[in-house]
Image: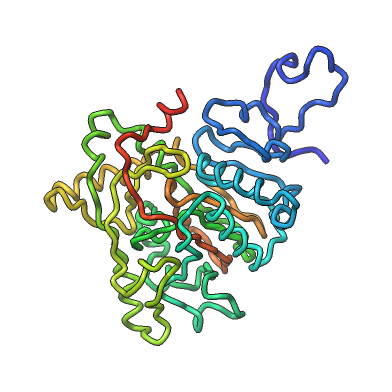
């Protein structure tokens, strides 16, 4: 079967050794992009086929790489640890047409964070507003969310009439200890199983590159500032649905109660890569605490536009049935595209990481990688 993915144009001598001219041409998934300076060491992943979607963010694995098989392989800990590092560098990775089930998603979300060294007290996140009676038509564990076009997003009015750029966010940034990895068959570990005929794409943006595109003077200005992250929409629905509200520990002993507010650094250091990343978003970040209200509004507007206005640090993913996305909420933002009719559903697992921090000795991604 002929691949639908384009082959990079390059000199034959660059991809076939002189002493092996009769070998088959390299599969289009195995491109020289993997040798680019912006790509981390692959470790055990170098045996897999994949394709980098953009220079700064996003890598795609074909159907031949099944996460369910990775989870049960004899060296699964090695592979998953390398995958966690890879996701933290690339921001988001996609796996096509996966057969992984809900239990597998939970295991994947748990082990990625654990093998990457997150605190022992951090587990899987439980969404503070459980929509069980109106959204779920089947039993799901409390630490698995149903992402649906009939859920909270639709009920809060964030639909076709909203400004699309308002939706950019990092999952659970309103928690004192927010998410590290997420998987979805739609992200965090997200698996999409029901899709409209067209539309409903998800966009991700690189927090690393958003920081790196700031001038050195502006970088110095925002480093050390802190911001309030708040979830009033969730809080309002909690007040209306007291019976289903989850006030206990939501993946960390510090994520309790119904306040749903947290203070985080505007620029945080990624604990795995050591890179600086912008950590504010349009959806949850409401105020920079060290500035006046007017100053805060101006700076937040500029920083959030740094994400929404720069398409060269974004990737747009069109879902196919049973695709899985895994992303790192510490260094990415994402948003859905509300441009479709019909049902869009998937299951999501969100791992809780560590409290965000800023290390003044950390480096930008571009400086660290020399790009």
Q: Residue at x 64, y 55 (%)?
A: 323
In percent of width and height, residue 153 lies at 42, 68
What's the colour scheme?
rainbow
Q: Residue at x 36, y 41 (%)?
A: 309
Quick one: 189 or 186, which is closer to the camera?
Answer: 189
In percent of width and height, residue 257 lies at 32, 74
Residue 186 visible in image = no
Q: Which image quadrant is residue 98 in?
A: bottom right
Q: Is residue 123 above or below residue 33?
A: below
Quick one: 332 or 352, which is closer to the camera?
Answer: 352
Q: Residue at x 40, y 59 (%)?
A: 178
Q: Which image quadrant is residue 235 in?
A: bottom left
Q: Is residue 118 above or below residue 152?
A: above
Q: Is residue 341 left or right of residue 267?
A: right
Residue 117 visible in image = yes
Q: Residue furthest front?
A: 120
Q: Residue furthest right?
A: 22
Q: Residue at x 60, y 36 (%)?
A: 52
Q: Which image quadrant is residue 253 in?
A: bottom left
Q: Is residue 197 above or below residue 318?
A: below
Image quarter where the N terminus lies is top right
In percent of width and height, residue 316 lies at 52, 46
Quick one: 261 or 96, which is closer to the camera?
Answer: 261
So how many labels did they put on this image? Answer: 0
Q: Residue furthest bottom?
A: 243
């Amino acid at each position: 079967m002929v691949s639908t993915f384009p082959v990079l144009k390059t000199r034959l001598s660059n991809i076939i050794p002189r002493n092996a001219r009769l070998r088959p041409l390299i599969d289009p998934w195995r491109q020289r992009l993997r040798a680019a300076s912006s790509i981390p060491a692959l470790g055990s992943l170098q045996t897999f086929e994949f394709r980098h979607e953009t220079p700064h963010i996003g890598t795609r694995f074909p159907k031949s790489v099944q996460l369910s098989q990775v989870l049960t392989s004899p060296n699964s800990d090695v592979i998953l640890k390398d995958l966690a590092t890879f996701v933290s560098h690339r921001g988001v990775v996609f796996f096509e047409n996966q057969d992984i089930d809900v239990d597998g998603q939970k295991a994947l979300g748990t082990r990625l964070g654990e093998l990457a060294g997150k605190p022992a007290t951090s587990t899987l996140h439980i969404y503070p507003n459980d929509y069980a009676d109106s959204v779920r038509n089947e039993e799901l564990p409390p630490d698995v969310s149903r992402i649906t076009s009939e859920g909270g997003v639709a009920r809060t009015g964030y639909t076709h009439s909203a400004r699309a750029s308002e939706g950019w966010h990092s999952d659970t940034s309103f928690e004192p200890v927010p998410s590290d990895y997420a998987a979805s068959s739609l992200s965090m570990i997200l698996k999409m199983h029901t899709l409209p005929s067209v539309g409903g794409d998800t966009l991700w943006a690189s927090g690393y590159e958003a920081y790196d595109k700031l001038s050195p003077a502006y970088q110095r200005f925002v480093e050390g500032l802190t911001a309030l992250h708040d979830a009033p929409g969730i809080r309002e629905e909690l007040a209306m649905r007291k019976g289903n509200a989850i006030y206990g520990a939501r993946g960390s002993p510090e994520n309790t109660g119904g306040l749903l507010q947290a203070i985080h650094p505007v620029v945080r250091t990624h604990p795995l890569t050591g890179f600086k990343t912008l950590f504010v978003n349009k959806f949850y970040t409401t105020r920079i605490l060290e500035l006046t209200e007017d100053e805060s509004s101006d700076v937040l507007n500029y920083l959030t536009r740094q994400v929404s206005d720069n398409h060269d640090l974004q990737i747009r993913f069109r879902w196919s049935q049973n695709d899985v996305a895994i992303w790192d909420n510490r260094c990415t933002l994402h948003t859905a595209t509300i441009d479709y009719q019909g049902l869009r559903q998937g299951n999501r697992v969100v791992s809780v990481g560590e409290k965000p921090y800023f290390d003044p000795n950390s480096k930008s991604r571009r400086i660290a990688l020399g790009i």
